[in-house]
Image: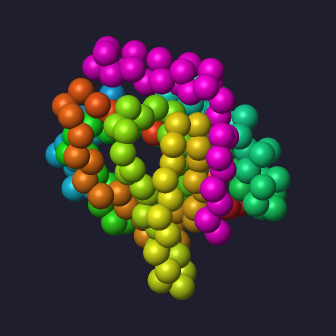
């Protein structure tokens, strides 16, 4: 299943979450991921309390949209991408069965889509603008982003919400 959720978050929620993410960045509380084989020039952290609350609040909606009553919240992850960031082709680790990617901020003024290869080897290109979300079966579908080429000060903030099947 690939499900696009336009305007999942309103502007106020995006602003609130962005402030939390940027505060963590400014306090040097996010992990630099430039040395990780899956990412480049990004900063991220799992289980930030404000994002964990969003994960719990989203669970009934995701159950309703998918019909999957047997999903259990696993974790959230927040990442800030800068010039040179990318996301290598991968499937999520076991336990992250359902992945929701939500963009909360972007000042790049260009397309930076999420690419997804489904179970039939069909490639999907999903542009996730601020407030939009894309839900996929993260452990079944290969997904990636091409390298981000922007000005040094430009960035994209994404939050990821994960559920596992009971």
Asked which quadrant contains residue 30, the reply is top left
Residue 33's place in the image compared with 28, above or below, is below
Residue 32's place in the image compared with 91, above or below, is above
Residue at 61% over, 65% down? 2
Residue at 59% over, 47% down? 133
Instruction: Give residue 147's position: percent from left, percent from top.
Output: 25, 53
Instruction: Give residue 70's position: percent from left, percent from top.
Output: 77, 59
Furthest toward the bottom, the residue is 120
Q: As drawn, is 165 to the left or to the right of 123?
A: right
Q: As drawn, is 76 to the left or to the right of 44?
A: right
Closer to the camera in the image, 154 or 78: 154
Inspect the magenta stretch and tell me whether residue 23 lies in it: yes
Asked which quadrant contains residue 80, the reply is top left
- Residues rendered magenta in the picture: 1-29
Instruction: Give residue 83's position: percent from left, percent from top.
Output: 22, 40
Q: As drawn, is 23 to the left or to the right of 136?
A: left
Whether residue 94 is visible, yes or no, is no
Residue 5's place in the image compared with 20, above or below, is below
State the quadrant of the N terminus.
bottom right
Furthest toward the front, the residue is 109
Whether residue 8 is visible, yes or no, is yes
Inspect the magenta stretch and tell me whether residue 66 lies in it: no
Residue at 37% over, 65% down? 90
Instruction: Give residue 104's position: percent from left, percent from top.
Output: 51, 33
């Amino acid at each position: 299943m690939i499900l696009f959720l336009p305007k999942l978050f309103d502007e106020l929620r995006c602003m609130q979450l962005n402030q939390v993410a940027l505060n963590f960045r400014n306090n040097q509380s996010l992990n630099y991921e430039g040395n990780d084989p899956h990412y480049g020039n990004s900063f991220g952290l799992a289980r930030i309390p404000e994002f964990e609350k969003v994960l719990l609040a989203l669970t009934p909606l995701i159950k309703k949209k998918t019909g999957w009553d047997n999903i259990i919240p696993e974790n959230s992850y927040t990442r800030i991408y800068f010039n040179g960031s990318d996301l290598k082709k991968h499937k999520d680790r076991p336990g992250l069965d359902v992945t929701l990617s939500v963009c909360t901020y972007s000042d790049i003024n260009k397309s930076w889509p999420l690419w997804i290869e489904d179970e039939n080897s069909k490639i999907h290109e999903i542009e996730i603008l601020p407030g939009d979300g894309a839900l996929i079966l993260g452990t079944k579908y290969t997904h990636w982003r091409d390298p981000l080429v922007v000005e040094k000060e430009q960035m994209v903030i994404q939050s990821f919400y994960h559920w596992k099947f009971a």
